[in-house]
Amino acid sequence: MPVLDHIHYELDVDALMKTLRIGAGGEDEAAFRNLLDDLAPRINPKALFIEAYVDTRGEDTVTVSGTTFRSKVLRRNLDRVHRLFPYVVTCGREMDEAHLPEGDFLTRFWLDTIKGAVLNCANRHLDAHLTRQFGLGKTAHMNPGSGDAWVWPIEQQRDLFALLGDVEDLIGVTLTDSMLMVPNKSVSGIRFPVERDFRSCQLCRREGCPGRSVPFDPVLFESVR
């Protein structure tokens, strides 16, 4: 089972401080840099992926290496795809083990932002690894629960984890009863080759989403409903 657990990361401290509105030269900057120093030995992002293949396609289902997913959008996106790459990427459990003062909500917010930046580094590392190892061209991702609920229901997170194997043992990511991942800065999905760009955000009508990467596309939305 391909696991990437020696992932190089670089955090842009100035950019993080700007995002968090931490001014230079003050007490907050000193506290933030101390937090980064404390976290440094614990930062250990990881990624897990498999090379999988489409077995069969139904009207609104697609079976991948023996696991059937129900999603009209996923089925449409994989219409001409044979090989794809299910994955889970995480910032790593180790940062959640850092000792923070009880009730210090500001430091916990900083920690969450740092974890997100580490996850972004790990995502880029996985993308680069897959492109290099498998000679991929243009690709897209789909993630359970991303976009409107019907796009790819978050409940199918369980099926994706089952397809990948013992995700908790391999990279320390678990699912809650509501299908959310722990650590919270983790992402799962399927990467697949495409001729045209696609992102789940195009089918999400949620306004003001901090994770939005592209605008909502009402034409595409109506075409796949």
Image (spheres, grey):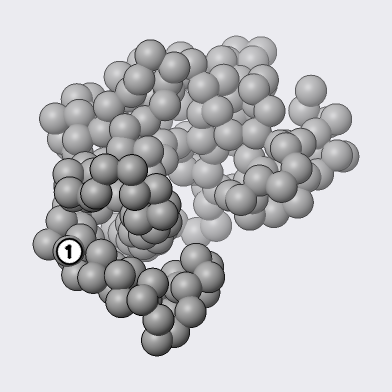
**Quarter of the figure that contains the N terminus:** top left
Q: Seen in the image, is 206 located left or right of residue 32?
A: right
Residue 162 at x, y percent in the picture: 30, 19
Q: Is residue 198 visible?
A: no
Give the residue number, with chain letter if any, for mark 1: 38
In the image, farthest residue toward the bottom: 25
Q: Position of residue 136 (x, y in %)?
A: 44, 56
Between 75 and 146, the one lying in front of the other is 146
SS assignment at label 1: helix
Residue 89 placement: quadrant: top left
Residue at left offset 61%, top offset 50%: 210
* Screen quadrant of the C terminus: top right
Q: Amino acid at mark 1?
A: Asp
Residue 158, above or below 141? above
**Foreground: 122 or 211?**
211
Q: Give the residue drawn at x 67%, y 20%.
A: 150
Crowding at mark 1 (Cα within 10 Å: few <14, some 14-19, many 20+) = some
Is residue 210 in view from this perspective?
Answer: yes
In the picture provided, is 158 more to the left or to the right than 57? left
Q: Position of residue 47 (x, y in %)?
A: 27, 46
Above or below for 158 versus 99: above
Q: Residue at x 40, y 81 (%)?
A: 26
From this view, report whether residue 93 is shown above or below residue 7. above
Q: Does residue 196 lie above or below 202 as drawn?
A: below
Give the image quarter of residue 80: top right
Q: Residue at x 51, y 22 (%)?
A: 154
**For this view, does 7 lie left or right of residue 17?**
left
* Rendering coords of residue 37 (x, y %): 19, 70
